[in-house]
Amino acid sequence: MVSEVGGLMTHGTVIAREYGLPAVIGVERATRPIRHGQRIRLHGTDGFVELLP
């Protein structure tokens, strides 16, 4: 999950944690370079998103 807004206790963060999904939350302009259907790799521990070809 990638979100530009939010924090540790927002709904998306809690859901991602419950389901064991990687999440990068609260990164300004994080979703703008991602095109619809594009593959990405999330580095949740390091807090960044990698765009895949």
Image (cartoon, rainbow, N blue to C red):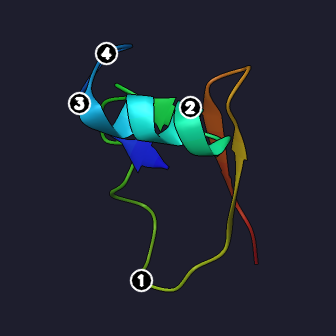
Amino acid type for the residue under numbered disc 1 = His
Q: Which comes before the other along the chain, label 3 or label 1?
A: 3
- In percent of width and height, residue 27 lies at 39, 28
Residue tagged by mark 1? 36
Task: Give the crowd class for mark 4: few <14, some 14-19, many >=20 residues within 10 Å.
Answer: few
Q: Which comes before the other along the chain, label 1 or label 4?
A: 4
Separation of disc 2 and disc 4 at Cα? 10 Å
- In percent of width and height, residue 29 lies at 31, 41
Q: Please identify, in this view, whether the residue under mark 1 or under mark 2 is nearer the observer.
A: 2
Callout 1–callout 4 Cβ contact below 8 Å = no
Q: Which comes before the other along the chain, label 1 or label 2?
A: 2
Mark on residue 9? Answer: 4
Pick the quarter of the image with the C terminus.
bottom right
Amino acid type for the residue under numbered disc 2 = Arg
Q: In the image as oriented, which residue stretches furthest toward the front? A: 18
Q: Give the image quarter of residue 33.
A: bottom left
Task: Give the crowd class for mark 3: few <14, some 14-19, many >=20 residues within 10 Å.
Answer: few
Mark on residue 5? Answer: 3
- In percent of width and height, residue 23 lies at 56, 38
Task: Give the crowd class for mark 2: few <14, some 14-19, many >=20 residues within 10 Å.
Answer: few
Residue 2 vs 17, above or below: the answer is below
